[in-house]
Amino acid sequence: MRPACGPVLWPGVLQDPNINLRAMDIDSAVVLADQKFGFINHTSTDLDAFIGRGGKLIMYHGWDDPSISPMNSINYYTSVVERMRDKRHLNGIEAAMAETQKSARLFLIPGMGHCGGGPGPDTFDAIGTLDQWVDHGMAPDKIIASHITPDYKRPLCAYPQQPRYNGSGDRTDAATWKCVSEPKP
């Protein structure tokens, strides 16, 4: 996958702010972009060195993101899980998911747009949650998030779980929600 920076990236890659994008050699520009901005290419599923150093990763993506489909994050995370299964010769996707979740978790946020906003719970302490995981070994199965006011709270659930309303009580109270896995067909 190439960096999704469009015309803003190309003048910087080619060191020419007046570049004619219609006349440039796109293949050469892509190679040069990979050389200069390879760190932007986030599609590698090889997290072994990161995990080996004790790294912990919290990813999150809004279900209402109008810019980047949340399926991109789901597909990436699923690819990380599959690589974990293959690399460690684990028996089944459930074992690979459990192993992956020791170091990396994905949270999908209902109603949140691109990096925030929207009608969903988009305010939460990702850094504090990560600190608790790294410093105290408390891996997050859920993160409590709010929207606009602290009175509106919902849980964000570690993928593949999703928040489900328990059927009674105040829907703006996180206690009336639980993280559940969808049944497999």
Image (tube, grey):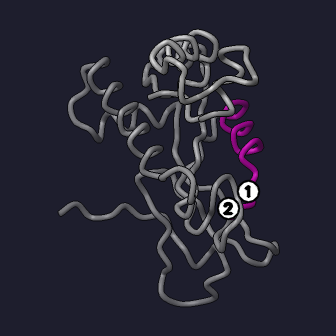
Q: Given the image, on which type of amino acid does mark 1 rest?
A: Phe
- Name which quarter of the figure residue 94 lies in: top left
Check residue 127 for magenta coloring: yes
Outermost residue toward the left in this view: 185
Q: Residues within 10 Å of mark 2 (few under 14, many from 20)?
A: some
Horizontal side of 14 relative to 47 (left or right) equals right
Which of pointers 1 and 2 lies earlier in the amino acid sequence?
A: 1
Which residue is located at x 58 percent, y 60 percent? 156
State the residue at coordinates (55%, 64%).
64
Q: Is residue 48 above or below residue 150?
A: above
Per the rendered image, the range of residues in magenta is 122-136
**Residue 19, labelled with which disc?**
none
Please name the amino acid that badge 2 sits on: Ile
Residue 98 percent coordinates (x, y): 39, 38
* Residue 86 relative to residue 99: left or right: left
For label 1, the SS is: loop
**In x, y percent, where is residue 48?**
47, 16
Dot 1: within a 10 Å radius of its alpha carbon, few (fewer than 14), some, or many (20 or more) residues?
A: some
Q: Which residue is mark 2?
A: 144
> Where residue 168 sits in the image (x, y, percent)?
53, 90
Q: Can you tell which mark lies on residue 124?
A: 1
CB contact under 8 Å: marks 1 and 2: yes
38, 48: nearer the viewer? 38
